Amino acid sequence: MTSAETSAETSARPAAVPRPQPAVDTAPLRALRRRRALLQVACWVVTAFMVVPVYLIALAAFSSRSALNEFPLRFLPTSFSTETMSTFLSSTGVLAGLINSIMVGLLTLVVSFLIGVPAGYAIARFAFRGHDQYQLFLLFTRALPIVVLSVPLAQLFLSTGVYDTPLAVTLLHSALALPTTILLTSAVFLAVPVDAEEAARIFGCTPVGAFTRVVLPLALPGIAAASIFTFVMSWNEVLGATILTLNQRTLPAQVLSSLSDSPLAFRFAGGFFLIIPAIVFIAVMRRYLLNMWGTTIR
Amino acid sequence: MAEITIQNLVKTYPGQTERATDDVSLHVDDGEFMVLLGPSGCGKTTLLRMVAGLELPDAGSVHIGGRDVTYLPPNKRNLSMVFQSYAVFPHRRVRHNIGFGLAMAKVPKAEIEKKVAWAADLLQLGPYLDRYPAQLSGGQRQRVAVARAIVMDADVLLMDEPLSNLDALLRLGFRAELKRIVEQIGTTTLYVTHDQVEALSLGDRIAVMRTGQVAQLGRPIEVYDHPSDTFVGGFIGSPPMNFLDAMAHGGVDGGVDGGTITVGDAKLPAPGGLPDGPVRLGIRAEAISVVDAHTEGAVPAMVDVVEPLGAATLLTVRVGEQEVKVQVPPDVNVRNGQTVHLSLTPRAMRLYDAETGLGLDLR
Ligand SMILES: Nc1ncnc2c1ncn2[C@@H]1O[C@H](COP(=O)(O)OP(=O)(O)OP(=O)(O)O)[C@@H](O)[C@H]1O
Ligand SMILES: [Mg+2]
């Protein structure tokens, strides 16, 4: 078809008569869109609220010392330097503290889950005398201030020779983490359908087999979430860790004790470094939080 | 292959006052297909779960193949089950769901694959083998549950309403298929349903349950023709059995055919030996026919509703104050409001105690 033909055809058509359109009330749809947009904005605000401080700390941690003292501060990385960071990392106690912290975090995870997961399962699945009271009682441990717990513990650990070891901190953190571990995992197990477990029993599994083959895989996302919670709690806990150790400090305890007499740059580096492991751990565990079999449990 | 003997099973759930099963005894022969039939909440699932070992009875015993399994865990009973709630494993693909029991029994991989393919073919699950249950429809999930159960060479197959979520066509096809498979592998089967057509068509015997008790146990045709009480008669059959208030006159003592029954104004012959007084007369819709007014013993009735069903026409008529369902051939021509005369086939009449509803056994 040539262009001449096309134009001829177009001109042959009668002039478009504007047909009256029935009025459509799009107000509800527009209102909905507006609300969605507002929600988006709210999400961005919350995200910014979380991210901006992290960004500022990261910026400061990777700026040269002179840039840090400039006024006004820049919002974009202009003078990238690893100088502050490496000073921080090579300063005494930081590496040891890091190792201690990771060790305590993982050990706490192991101890509190070895005790907490079976307890959570029992609360979710069995009706026993004192079931509700037990649940309430669990929360009481958290009602005690950490200081109140730590001082007698320090006394006890001193006399048993556990004082000033990662084990001491692990024990305290496990005690602190257990209530939440138990209550979180019991909620997770409650969401695992009982009948799937029963089907496993019918088709030849022992109780333990049914647990490991069916219940545990189904509970994994929730357990991952609980583990994030526990690890981050242990990572961030300073007070008890400070009371129970002298030389074998965890990283936050180490940083805290040397913070007051450090230069500003050092503080930023320490702050930034404290954030990283928690973020890495969350990123790793996030995989298990997402739906794995085309569905998350409930 | 094994027989199931259930003796005096009593179960009350914790915190409940009513018994879920109340002294149930039942014997299922080796290779028999036993159907548990009853209204919702009558204790069918509870009974099945006690046979499976998922629920412990308060009293009584369960024997499978002569072995006392009452307190044995489910995995030691060598049985297989279709759950009412399907209970497929959400974290396993359909293929591994079906093969789960075989894998647990350490069956060689090649054989598992063969059996899974066989079951998938039978239940039309072929295209879905590599999906997760969450990606299936309810009916497909149910078929996975059935497939998972039938691939096992178990002594006992327990099925809790395995066809409830299939469409009518699939259900019809699969019902016949299921009957064939079970006959073929000869597994002793305990099958729960509240669909009486399914019960009548599948069962070697039917146990009709009511509020935790077995109301009647017998072959389908027996249960259909001779309901032991008004509950069973009213539950089985579509439409259910009609019950009419009537008066019995015993006639000559011990006489064979001396008695009469009065329904409304009509006098009908009845077996002798009846106590004088009120009775309930039970009769199926297809045992009533429409006749002309002069027939001996015809009962007059008013037509209320006419429902053509294709193969037959269902009439709802009124005898005095009582409603009666009548099934007539499709060519019978009646209209609403018309008065018709009904003839009750004497052989098909069942008499029940007016108060207890129990059958007056005069057969
Ligand atoms: N876990 C439970 N706790 C308390 N009561 C229960 C429990 N399970 C069942 N019941 C009660 O026991 C009775 C029997 O229940 P069951 O599940 O055996 O009925 P069913 O015959 O299978 O009914 P349906 O046809 O609806 O499946 C019901 O009254 C029910 O409310
Ligand atoms: Mg049921």
Image (cartoon, coloured by chain):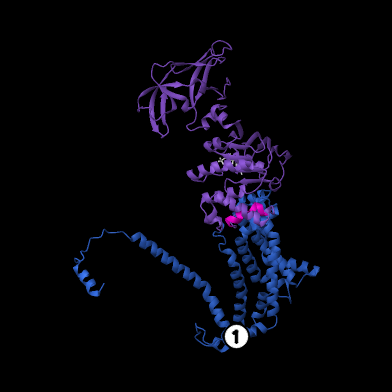
* Residue shown at the point (63%, 69%) measured from the top left: A232
Residue A7 magenta-highlighted: no
Q: Which chain is blue?
A: A
In this view, the residue in front, A295 or B148, is B148
In the rendered image, the quadrant that contains the C terminus of chain B is top right
Image coordinates for residue B41, horizontal then vertical, percent: 57, 39
Q: Which residue is mark 1?
A: A82
In the picture provided, is A211 more to the left or to the right than A43? right
Q: Which residue ends up furthest to the bottom in the rendered image?
A: A66
In this view, the residue in front, B302 or B156, is B156
Q: Is residue A235 above or below residue B243?
A: below
| Residue B87 can be seen, yes or no | no
In this view, the residue in front, B152 or A295, is B152
Q: Amino acid at mark 1?
A: Thr
Residue B101 magenta-highlighted: yes
Taken as a whole, is the magenta stretch helix, strand or loop? helix
Image coordinates for residue B306, horizontal then vertical, percent: 38, 31
Q: Is residue B234 above or below residue A92?
A: above
| Residue B202 can be seen, yes or no | yes
Colour in which the image shows chain B: purple
In the picture provided, is B230 more to the left or to the right than A213? left
Q: Is residue A253 above or below residue A224?
A: below
Q: Residues within 10 Å of mark 1 (few under 14, many from 20)?
A: some
Chain letter of mark 1 equals A
The quadrant in which residue A116 appears is bottom right
Task: Give the extent of the magenta segment.
Answer: B93-103
In the rendered image, the quadrant that contains the N terminus of chain B is top right
